[in-house]
Image: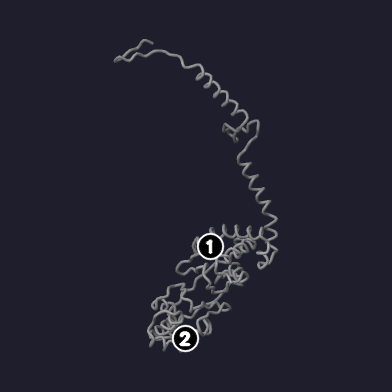
Amino acid sequence: TGHEWDGIKELNKPLPRWWVWTFYATILWAIGYWVVYPAWPTLSGYTKGMFGYSQRAVVAGEIGAARAAQGQLRDKLAVTPLNRVTEDPDLLRFAMAGGAAAFQTNCGPCHGRGAQGFAGYPNLNDDSWVWGGTPEQILQTITHGVRDATSDQTRLSEMPAFGRDSVLNAAQIGETAAFVRQLSGQETDQAKSGKGAQIYAENCASCHGEKGEGNAELGGPQLNDAIWLYGGEESQIAAQIRAPRHGMMPAWAPRLGETVVKELAVYVHSLGGGQ
C-alpha cells in the first residue's frame, strides 16, 4: 500500500499458497461436518445430520449393555444364600464391587469412607459387633436398621438412664464406670472399681455379660475390649451410664432394595471384623 511510518513500510505480500489451500480445506471440512453430524440448534431441537449420530444415544446404549450384563449376576445374587456367595468367584467380585460403591454413597457419611467410624458411629473394621458380625446378622441389621420406627423388625435396645431416672446416685455411677474401665484392662481406682463390681452385677451384667463380653441377642455392647462408641474415659463412661445416648440407623432395604443390601452385607463382612 506504500504506507510508511517511523521507518516501517506496509506492503501487500500474498499468503503462501499452501496456507490458502489449507484455509479453504478447513472451510470445506466444517461444511461437511455440519451436513453429516448434529451441528445447529433449531426452534424444535437441533439438526440431526446425515449420520444421525448422538453421544447421548451412545452412552445410553453402553449403560443399557452394562446393566444387561449385570442382570444375570444380580438375579443370581438375589437368590443365592449369603453363606454361598463366596463359593462363586464371579458372584463374589460382583457383590464386593456393588457393596463398596453403595457403602461410599450411603454408609460412608456416618461410618467413614474407610469404615473407621466416628464418635457415636461404630467402627466396622474391628471385631466388636453390637448385633453380631456374621453375614446373616449384618444383613439383618442393614435390612431393618437400628431403632428405626418404620420397620417392625428393627434392631431395638435401650439402656436405662441410671442417673437421670435416679436408679443410681452419682457415687454409684462413678464406681460402676471405674469397674467398666477395669473390665477392659484400663487403669482405674481399685477401691471405686471394687464397689462398682457389685453394682455392675446387679444392674448391667444381664445385658453386657458378667465379664463384659456383651450380648448380641439383646444388643448389649461388649465392654471388655477397650472399644468405645462414646469414649472410654471414666467421665465419658459415667455420662453414658447417667443418661445414655442411643444411635439410630435407617432400615436400608426399602431404600436400596434387597439385592443392594445383600451386596452391602458381603462388603461389610469382608472389611476385617466379620465373624
Residue type at mark 1: give it: Cys
Residue 25's x, y, as percent? 56, 22
Q: Earlier in the sequence, mark 1 or mark 2?
A: 1
Q: Nearer the viewer, residue 40 or 273?
A: 273
Q: Is residue 27 left or right of residue 198?
A: right
Rendered view: 140 above or below 5: below
Q: Secondary structure at mark 1?
A: helix
- Left of 95 or right of it: where is 106? left
Q: What residue sits right under mark 1 in the picture?
A: 107
**Who is closer to the viewer here, 194 or 146?**
194
Q: Secondary structure at mark 2?
A: helix
Q: Position of residue 207 (x, y in %)?
A: 53, 82
Locate the N terminus by quadrant.
top left
| Quadrant position of residue 233 | bottom left
Quarter residue 167 falls in: bottom left
* Location of residue 269 with respect to 15 vertically, above or below: below
| Quadrant position of the C terminus in the picture | bottom right
Q: Of residues 25 and 105, which is closer to you in this image?
A: 25
Instruction: Name the residue beneath numbered marker 2.
Output: 200
